[in-house]
Amino acid sequence: MAGSTFGNHLQITTWGESHGTGIGVVVDGCPAGLPLCESDIQKFLNRRKPGQSRYSTPRKEDDSVEILSGVFEGRTTGTPISLVVFNKNQRSRDYGDIASYYRPGHADYTFDQKYGFRDYRGGGRSSGRETIGRVAAGAIAVKILAQLGISFFTYARAIGPVSIPQTAADLLTRLEVSDKELHRQILADPLYMPDSSSSEKAQEYLEACMKQLDSAGGVIEGIITGVPAGVGEPVFDKLDANLAKAIFSIGAVKGFEIGDGFLAAAASGSSNNDSFRIQDGQIIAASNHAGGILGGISSGAPVIYRAAIKPTPSIASHQKTVNQAGEEISISIHGRHDPIIVPRAVVVVESMAALTLLDLMLEHMGAKMDSLRKFYP
Amino acid sequence: MAGSTFGNHLQITTWGESHGTGIGVVVDGCPAGLPLCESDIQKFLNRRKPGQSRYSTPRKEDDSVEILSGVFEGRTTGTPISLVVFNKNQRSRDYGDIASYYRPGHADYTFDQKYGFRDYRGGGRSSGRETIGRVAAGAIAVKILAQLGISFFTYARAIGPVSIPQTAADLLTRLEVSDKELHRQILADPLYMPDSSSSEKAQEYLEACMKQLDSAGGVIEGIITGVPAGVGEPVFDKLDANLAKAIFSIGAVKGFEIGDGFLAAAASGSSNNDSFRIQDGQIIAASNHAGGILGGISSGAPVIYRAAIKPTPSIASHQKTVNQAGEEISISIHGRHDPIIVPRAVVVVESMAALTLLDLMLEHMGAKMDSLRKFYP
Amino acid sequence: MAGSTFGNHLQITTWGESHGTGIGVVVDGCPAGLPLCESDIQKFLNRRKPGQSRYSTPRKEDDSVEILSGVFEGRTTGTPISLVVFNKNQRSRDYGDIASYYRPGHADYTFDQKYGFRDYRGGGRSSGRETIGRVAAGAIAVKILAQLGISFFTYARAIGPVSIPQTAADLLTRLEVSDKELHRQILADPLYMPDSSSSEKAQEYLEACMKQLDSAGGVIEGIITGVPAGVGEPVFDKLDANLAKAIFSIGAVKGFEIGDGFLAAAASGSSNNDSFRIQDGQIIAASNHAGGILGGISSGAPVIYRAAIKPTPSIASHQKTVNQAGEEISISIHGRHDPIIVPRAVVVVESMAALTLLDLMLEHMGAKMDSLRKFYP
Amino acid sequence: MAGSTFGNHLQITTWGESHGTGIGVVVDGCPAGLPLCESDIQKFLNRRKPGQSRYSTPRKEDDSVEILSGVFEGRTTGTPISLVVFNKNQRSRDYGDIASYYRPGHADYTFDQKYGFRDYRGGGRSSGRETIGRVAAGAIAVKILAQLGISFFTYARAIGPVSIPQTAADLLTRLEVSDKELHRQILADPLYMPDSSSSEKAQEYLEACMKQLDSAGGVIEGIITGVPAGVGEPVFDKLDANLAKAIFSIGAVKGFEIGDGFLAAAASGSSNNDSFRIQDGQIIAASNHAGGILGGISSGAPVIYRAAIKPTPSIASHQKTVNQAGEEISISIHGRHDPIIVPRAVVVVESMAALTLLDLMLEHMGAKMDSLRKFYP
């Protein structure tokens, strides 16, 4: 379990380094018969591509995906789907200095401690480019789930200290915004922040950061609607536990919450409990402090979660560190770095959430004898 | 993967319901030759036992553990250790009403949706008693890790809105408190809150809660010292990702953070990065915003994490809900419930953290060819 | 992966030693709603109990099973089923000698090499009693599969050099024997050998063995009818590969075959291929050299497999060996040992086959998008 | 668990179809610091390449491997090694007929039953080309194990009815042949059959087969020397059980044995037990009926196993079958097929054995507290 594989039913295995030949993923367990072509996946990769706004690295990463297996005559065959993005635009430059010292906030030191040495070019395996495989696989999961009536809304809830006042889940629930309109708002904003006044303030904050050769973090929020009740396993493979792992396995994540999250810790039981009531003959929750999950199992209410993303560790201002010779030195990291990775990480978070949910939905299919009897009549 | 098994190398499998015959765990993959007896485990179980203070349920749960296998002549044999706590004090009462309606904040509704019916006695499998198996296994993991120089400090950082001003990690780092003294302070406090002035305020808050027939939540903080650098896998099985899943799989957890967590999202890169420096010939981090993990791999600095615990959902004040017949009803939950579960959950959190760390330490042993050559000379 | 857990969807975890407190199993992932009581399981355990004939040990093992969890009001709840058989009849005797030397054909030496020491009482974890957990779990799997129209016929095909001339699969296929009658014949024979003339010869052979203080082995054959086409994964988790592992994980197994097995190696392609034809509008195989599996996936034809069981290693005649002090010694193993374990192993083989098949049937439920769309409408 | 991943510590994930873009494998968990280049792997692939003798298909498969990740400056980095062989020589032809009917002995019918349709070009995922990924990964495992003193000898023991009289294990043990000489003999023979007189007879047999437009099977035998005692887990992950699964997951395998295998079933305990004795101060087995494994754990004696390989199902003589329209038809399969696959399968079997052994050797590293204390001082 060297941990490049994720999931039990739908399993993804990622590989590749920032400056190696390419980055890829093998998706095993994808149900047969899904129409799939490269543009389904490319669409997702484009959301994480740099250069979409002035708040991402000006590096040109021309990440075009190729399907190497598992699709025949336009449909998935049920066998592994191998996807690759060849690295085309990696500058050949001298990495001599970066090879010898440990950048603060990066995995240089810990990789050396673990493996004895490391591929230091562009961060090697610990580069953000590793997430290309996740996003390529996530595109497939989101497409499958869309066919089952499940929608994902993922966006920047906060950039640095600037936060959207209320969750989009409330807007959706109160029908103040349609699904389509919310998706449009998210994609239209340069920070994927679907609230124009917050986004403006956030952009001002980022400009100030950049002037100071500094970087910023933020909070990504995700809402999943249409999740059927009953998904998630009651003990270790709770839907929220698996989401926590999935999201926390993304490089820069430092916190994760479901529903009210840390606010729930300070609330009282009477205000935090969600009453049940009947609407149109259906049992629904009158509020959604729980974020759509009770006892690790989906309740049918929208699933709401949040991820804290740390500021980009690569900054151009001076920093102290040490080198492999054990000397204290001062460095400043030049190059084409993102002043913030939150907007590009939005689709990574959505991808991991979709892979997690689909995996547990496949698991759930065998939970009842009735289901087996119906499937094997 | 019905999810009652956790871990890859040290695997635990829990079983049992609140009001069934017993609760148990099978621990597979425990290294051979560890001295182990029932009191090693009982000590841990006693920390989660109710009735330790007036802030836990007055139910008497006389949870005494029995070792059924895997130990011979006082030492672990390397084969599965089966541990059981027989349920002795479950009141035989009429559960007729609870069987028919869905308690807000509980898993009653989602279990019915998943399985078609449920063992409704005391919450069945979704009861907090399920954690007995985790704690019994955790006691073994903590004992193993202690022999490798690793210590756990786990305590209530916040109760409702009352929080200890600074993390104990700072105290430990600045040597303002010794390991032994910190352990003593934690265990001496009725809320496992090692700051007497905060604890007093928290107790006042809880008294007020109880008078209003309401309940409270809180934040549990954990610090792990002595973790060697290099533990954790760089992609999906990051140390922080696996901790997130482990802790989030505990019933009432709604949020999880590493290091500065959500605060990091609002910080700048220059303030959030931890510089490296040399101390006594060793590379160390000058600060610890990262919480001891970089790129998913331990750096050697103390691992710091936090879990948000929601308020106990069982409250005696009136609540609206629905029953299985689809009628809206009003209920009030009587019985012997904890007004707060944070203090009892402290040892559960510590147990899950220890199991996670040990599992990844076993994985790490094969990371280098040099290690294999040394082991198989 | 210390390997006391088997399966991915229906997972069993066994524990216990020959002379410890008990032997048990946790069955996780059993679908909810299956009627289950202790006698369903006891019936299976009785088939492996010693003392059923003069060809098994006269030890009295009063193996009665208790259900500790996972069943409520007579039906499985979907949560882990914990089953235990407490060891009641283990003679307290002096094991001093057995502790110090290595019995040929047993795991004494290899356990010491692996773990540094061992529980030497009755073989400890490597005792045949470990299979009690497998059989208890297997009883559940067989019951579930029976509800889906799947039947198991498992019997001694050969005892020492005495073999039944033709496989019962042929008899079933040619309708020369009914399912019910075949089951009756198997259970009625003291060796579970459903051919009276072969059984008589086998019994004569065993009598001769016993007089010479020696032991015998044999071949167990299993037939599974009613398996739907499409079960098994095409690469590593082939139905035959998983059966091979499952059966080979039983202590005394030294060989495994599917269909014609080793005979196929000497056959020609033209005689070994099974033609397809149409019968009653269905595609069927005109012969069954393949044993019901093509490319790792069930074809709908009966699954046929065979396991070679070695002779009981515990024999009363003199043997040479060494002790822990590194001295060559001569021993003779007294005690109440089976002159042959084949008849008692029949139900163990059937149990492992049933667990394997059910596990892959659960996996198969998510193989097609159509299945997902039907399940999540 | 769609089953394209094998192993727990060293995990391989294969992908690709016969006539798709390529065939590949991701090797995760390879220890860091192993010198590795493409020729290490190519050497192995060349052993399974067709056209090495007149007994394999005259198809030209120019299988050259590329390393896409996981190797930096000539050494493995500890992160996933992605290997690919692009399909270059797949004839573009009309597959119209093969698409519509079910070839006897192939997986056409079962794939359709499982997935609803299939990639019919050259067998798609069920093609023997799938084993390219296994062999590429196996080359790495064999290289690692060689550094730990472990050697593999794998060869054709039987071709059709022609068998080498005695196992090479006896020759090695009696020092009648050196390791180097045995390797030379295996590689020098066109059938990888290290006994010239047997090989000649086998070649005559194959010539006769080919004249009759028929095909042949055989038995592959493997010997592993230098395996340290203690490897393998005592219950479900026995060394022999995992080998059985690994080897049985290769397409054409119909039987598997360890040591004396099916012969042991007919032997007596007194003749089948291997006595221990002392040689040069070491405990060794005086004979090796057990094939180097006791209770699922290696004993230090050579591991000996055998796999039965069925005759190639693609034959040019007439066969009856059915088509998708449900009509009975007669076919004869033309094209460039192997009259026997045994020689080409030898390296596949060796690869799977090596991957299995290495995986369990990595698992074994954490079996004792002493090992942990030494590793984490």
Image (tube, coloured by chain):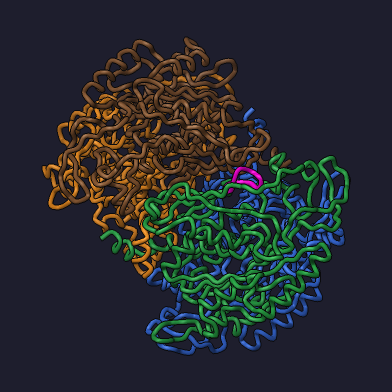
Chain colours: A blue, B green, C brown, D orange
Which residue is nearer to you in this view: C140 or A100? C140
As drawn, is D333 to the left or to the right of D195?
right
Residue D69 in sight: no
**Residue D94 inside the magenta-drawn segment:** no
Tell me residue C5's x, y (percent). 47, 45
Q: What is the residue that sits farthest to the left in this orientation?
A: D176
Q: Quarter holding the C terminus of chain B?
A: bottom left
Determine if residue B239 is in view. yes
Judge whether residue B19 is colored magenta. Answer: yes
- Measured as percent of width and height from the top left, residue D244 is found at 37, 39
| Residue located at (53% from left, 42% from top) | C26
Magenta residues (range): B15-23
Q: Position of residue D250 (x, y in %)?
A: 39, 39
Q: Which image quarter: residue B56?
A: bottom right
Q: In this rendered view, identify the residue nearer to me: D266 or B333.
A: B333
Q: Looking at the image, is B327 positioned above or below residue A220?
A: above
Q: Nearer the viewer, residue D175 or B163?
A: B163
Q: Which image quadrant is residue C163 in?
A: top left
The answer to whether residue D22 is above or below residue A186 is above
Using the image, determine if residue B337 lies above or below residue D47. below
